[in-house]
Image (cartoon, rainbow, N blue to C red):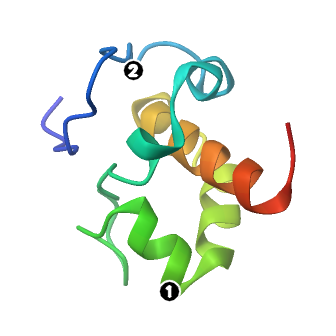
Amino acid sequence: NNMQYATPSAPAYNENMPAEELARQMSYEDAVKLIYPCNGNHKGQTLGQIAIEDFSCIEWIVNNLSQPKYNLIRAGAIVIRNKHTGRA
């Protein structure tokens, strides 16, 4: 796996876990530090930057980035979306 993510503080996240399960373990502080690895306008930005500049992209990640190799990124987007929309 050659993707580069900002290193979250502890705990170490298991990218093989489903995104929804990862999201339950992930803090908002860790989620906003994750680096978006996909090509496009936001490649290389943190999820926190994306949330500020283009929140609809966070929703897009949650709803469309379904490949298992992106579980960590999708989990971070779920955490951010839930905090900003008041979802539990």
- Disc 2 target residue: 15
Q: Say which residue appears at 18% left-offset and 28% top-offset.
A: 1
* Callout 2 secondary element: loop
Is 32 situated left or right of 81 in this image? left
Task: Where is residue 20? Give x, y as percent.
Answer: 68, 26
Return the residue at label 1: 53
**Badge 2: how crowded within 10 Å, few (<14), some, or many (20+)?**
some
Pinpoint residue 66: horizontal percent, then vertical percent.
Answer: 60, 40
| Residue 27 tag number | none
88 and 72: which is toward the camera: 88
Q: Residue at left 51%, top 33%?
A: 27
Residue at disc 1, secondary structure: helix
Q: Is residue 28 something that shows in the picture?
A: yes
In the rendered structure, which amino acid carries the disc numbered 2?
A: Glu
Q: Position of residue 37 (x, y in %)?
A: 29, 56
Q: Nearer the viewer, residue 3 or 22?
A: 22
* Residue at 36 percent of width and 76 percent of height: 42
In the image, is 62 to the left or to the right of 40? right
Horizontal side of residue 44 vs 17, given as left or right: left
Above or below, 70 against 64 in this view is above
Closer to the camera in the image, 65 or 15? 15
Which residue occupies the extreme right position in the image?
87
Q: Residues within 10 Å of mark 1 (few under 14, many from 20)?
A: few
Image coordinates for residue 82, horizontal then vertical, percent: 75, 49
Does residue 3 lie above or below 19 as drawn?
below
Identify which amino acid the numbered label 1 is placed on.
Glu
Using the image, determine if residue 29 lies above or below residue 8.
below
Q: Given this view, does label 2 or label 1 mark the residue nearer the observer?
A: 1
Q: Quadrant of the C terminus?
A: top right
